[in-house]
Image (cartoon, coloured by chain):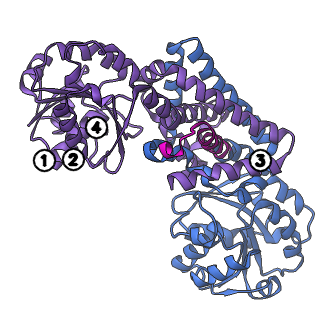
Chain colours: A purple, B blue
Amino acid sequence: MTVGIIGTGLIGGSIAIGLRESGFADSFLGIDTCEKNTAKAVELGLVDEAVVLDEMLERCQIIVVATPVDALVKLLPSILNNIGEGQTVLDVGSTKLPILQAIAGHPKRHRFVATHPMAGTEYSGPTAAIPKLFDGKCCVFCEAEKSAPDAVELALKLYQSLGMRITQLNGEEHDLHTAYVSHISHIASFALALTVLEKEQEEGRIFELASGGFSSTVRLAKSSPETWIPIFRQNRDNVLDVLDEFINTVSRFRTLLIKKDFDTFHELMGKANDIQRIIG
Amino acid sequence: MTVGIIGTGLIGGSIAIGLRESGFADSFLGIDTCEKNTAKAVELGLVDEAVVLDEMLERCQIIVVATPVDALVKLLPSILNNIGEGQTVLDVGSTKLPILQAIAGHPKRHRFVATHPMAGTEYSGPTAAIPKLFDGKCCVFCEAEKSAPDAVELALKLYQSLGMRITQLNGEEHDLHTAYVSHISHIASFALALTVLEKEQEEGRIFELASGGFSSTVRLAKSSPETWIPIFRQNRDNVLDVLDEFINTVSRFRTLLIKKDFDTFHELMGKANDIQRIIG
């Protein structure tokens, strides 16, 4: 099997590594808008060859589009225009409604499977690609009923060969839930890093005193704006909704500090401790 | 050397493990206000014996007080009342001004060394104690000039035997900087966990979809209120100050989303990326 990877960065590259390791496919063709990235992906052995789109569509049974979600919305219709009934196209985007709407009436809609493998790191580009990134993590399939059964089956096999659990959501549900468990943590982390950088005049102190807890909380603030701005743009309404709630909660803690109401503060912290019960 | 550990939890227990491994001391006596914890600490081999305070003060050359910071302020003066010139007392608290003020005029002030080994995990109690917790981390010494040189030297040896880097700050500086790089990340994490728990009606979805990024950002929300409420109480003014700034920053992101000003959003994310340059 020959797999085409469009966007040979953290996600696309890690998928290629995983599929080669699992034996799902033995040949990988790559495309990246950044030529340096394509060359690096070949050098690192993530993909075997850098090709142009026409050649990829000619040679690949399955094409994984792992670009930022704004590029995906522009690119996917033209990919679907040019593929045949034996080919399957997957995306891996962190937002789903816009892409589902963009290709809703496309005559080749059924060759596309909308998926979101929920895994990543704070790094980006081909050098960030790592083995086992997806192992044990969850992959969301969206509106799989609009995809051809053979395409869904192939996508399932692909993600299962990466060790992923599969779940199904519709586009609205997906975008809502990812705003809660993924997008808001990125904004919280970015805001925390920015606050500390602006407030702490002595940068050396951050470096000197930062412990594991701080590093863990600001880890996502290292993430690439090129990936995340398009996500926040596409999922703006859901993100705003949970962001408002987050501001309310932080402000509640602030008010309790001002009033020195440490009993209620304790109670809220106890409730937050519940997260341990859920994510272990 | 016999070391007394008051508060045989995450920090006190991990210090005992480290000092035993490094050969700094070979005998450890423990006290915990919670009898179950003391028994567990003996069972786990963190300390050799559970004792009462009088016996500890009689038998130990060095006493490490690793209680929550509110208990510390109450306990330390009476410990100092009862020790001799050959004994040294350390604390490990995450706030420093209140304790320094509490014992400022004490006739045995010079036998106390105020220290803060900046390391931890989100877990607590004797079972949370782990080897190498402090290895490569930073330990802050506060107002060491008010401690006897031999006491400071012993404390230095103790922390160096745990693999720690040492830095010096006065009490004000310490409490300000820890508000920035430690205390605020805990509040951000608690607020994020609480927001998601309150907003996400389907708890199962959090469990199902949570990836490494989310877990990393809410990790500190598992921390014990018993440890953290006294810290927020004692360092309230500094925490409020940085909390206000954090709320401003999150609100800035919110306004940019509302206005769809993704250029400025991108710029702020780029600035936050700078945290990578500092903490790597």
Sequence order check, earlier mark of 4 and 3:
4
**Tag 4 near tag 1, CB within 8 Å:** no
Q: Which mark is nearer the camera, 1 or 2?
A: 2
Where in the figure is residue B70, as x and y percent of width and height? 82, 60
Callout 4 amino acid = Thr
Callout 3 amino acid = Phe
- Secondary structure type for disc 4: helix
Q: Is residue B189 rendered magenta in the image?
A: yes
Q: Dot 3 corresponds to which residue?
A: A265
Q: Is residue B117 depicted above or below B275 in this figure?
A: below
Sequence order check, earlier mark of 4 and 1:
1
For image coordinates 10% across by 28% down, the residue present is A60
The disc label shown at residue A161, or none: 2
Parent chain of label 1: A
In this rendering, would A211 be left or right of A43?
right
Q: Gap between marks 4 and 1, in whole Å? A: 22 Å
Marks 3, 1 in one chain: yes
